[in-house]
Image (spheres, grey):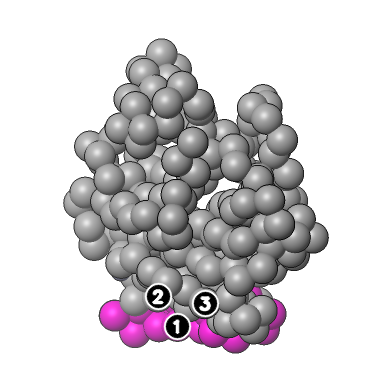
């Protein structure tokens, strides 16, 4: 069910699911009833006690939605809340989960950082929103995603993204142009003084994780954060 799960602060847990949790996305041609049943099973396994994870309709942009109570999935690639459990779905893109201390309790954040999101700054945008909501001492957890040795892209695309985020410049293990998106995310967080407490491995190399590049037609796993009550 969980690829990685840890109580990262007293009363706050971060987790990343694996293929045992199954596909959690409604937009990849899977039966909606099956997806909702898996989401419910995940909420039970997480001990949410009747609460639900807030998902979002991800569009590879850099919009951040502030979540105040359960809402329809916002069209956004990042969310911030002051307690509502949050979920970000990926299969090779970088799932970023964040937590900070607010005046009245933890401030939570998630971001979906694919190639367009890294280039357009979705990670700095979610950190800015969290700070606007009063978060201090923000830390980040980066889930499994496709690594720089596997994520082959055309030369012009590498040049384009690396011009904005130099840390993404990479070569595949077979010597062709590539992008290292997790390295780009780590650089963006580092520039903002946000420490990275966990950085997961490569989805393409790991059978227990969904990978778009490995499987094409594939499900989505999730990065999650929740408070314990
Ligand atoms: Zn790899």
The earlier-in-sequence mark between 3 and 1 is 1
Examine the image and state in which quarter residue 123 appears: bottom right
Whether residue 217 is situated above or below residue 60 in the rendered picture: above
Q: Is residue 220 highlighted in magenta?
A: no
Examine the image and state in which quarter residue 149 appears: bottom left
Range drawn in magenta = 161-178
Alpha carbon distance from label 3 to label 1:
22 Å
Alpha carbon distance from label 1 to label 2:
6 Å
Q: Secondary structure at mark 1?
A: strand
Q: Residue 218, position in %: x, y? A: 35, 39
> Farthest residue toward the right?
132
Whether residue 119 is situated above or below residue 5 in the rendered picture: below
Going 29% across and 80% down the picture, which residue do you hit? Answer: 173
Does residue 114 appear in this view?
no
Going 30% across and 32% down the picture, which residue do you hit? Answer: 45
The earlier-in-sequence mark between 2 and 3 is 2
Choose mark 2 or mark 3, whichever is in front: 3
- For label 1, count other residues whose C-alpha is less than 10 Å away and answer few (under 14), some (14-19) or many (20+): many
Choose mark 3 or mark 1, whichever is in front: 3
Q: Name the side, left or right, on which 97 lies relative to 143.
A: right
Residue marked by disc 3: 195
Residue marked by disc 1: 170
Whether residue 191 is situated above or below residue 157 in the rendered picture: below
Q: Secondary structure at mark 2?
A: loop
Residue marked by disc 2: 148
Going 45% across and 64% down the picture, which residue do you hit? Answer: 141
Q: Are marks 1 and 2 in contact (CB under 8 Å)?
A: yes
The quadrant of the rendered image in which ligand 1 is seen is bottom left
Queried on whether the Cβ of the residue with tag 2 lies below 8 angstroms from ligand 1, the answer reads yes
Q: Residue 50, position in %: x, y? A: 46, 22
């Amino acid at each position: 069910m969980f690829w990685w799960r840890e109580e990262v602060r007293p009363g706050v847990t971060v987790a990343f699911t694996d293929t045992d949790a199954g596909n959690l996305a409604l937009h990849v041609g899977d039966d909606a009833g099956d997806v909702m049943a898996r989401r419910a099973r995940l909420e039970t396994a997480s001990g949410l006690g009747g609460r639900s994870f807030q998902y979002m309709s991800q569009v590879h942009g850099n919009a951040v939605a502030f979540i105040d109570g359960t809402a329809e999935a916002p069209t956004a690639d990042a969310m911030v809340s002051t307690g509502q459990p949050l979920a970000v779905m990926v299969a090779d893109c970088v799932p970023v989960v964040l937590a900070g201390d607010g005046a009245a309790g933890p401030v939570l954040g998630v971001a979906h950082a694919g190639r367009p999101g890294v280039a357009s700054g979705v990670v700095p945008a979610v950190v800015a929103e969290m700070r606007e909501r009063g978060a201090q001492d923000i830390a980040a957890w980066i889930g499994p995603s496709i690594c720089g040795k596997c994520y082959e892209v055309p030369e012009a695309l590498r040049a384009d993204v690396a011009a904005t985020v130099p840390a993404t410049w990479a070569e595949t293990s077979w010597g062709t142009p590539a992008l290292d998106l997790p390295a780009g995310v780590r650089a963006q967080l580092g520039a903002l003084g946000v420490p990275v407490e966990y950085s997961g491995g490569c989805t393409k190399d790991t059978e227990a994780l969904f990978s778009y590049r490995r499987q094409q037609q594939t499900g989505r796993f999730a990065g999650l954060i929740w408070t314990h009550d």
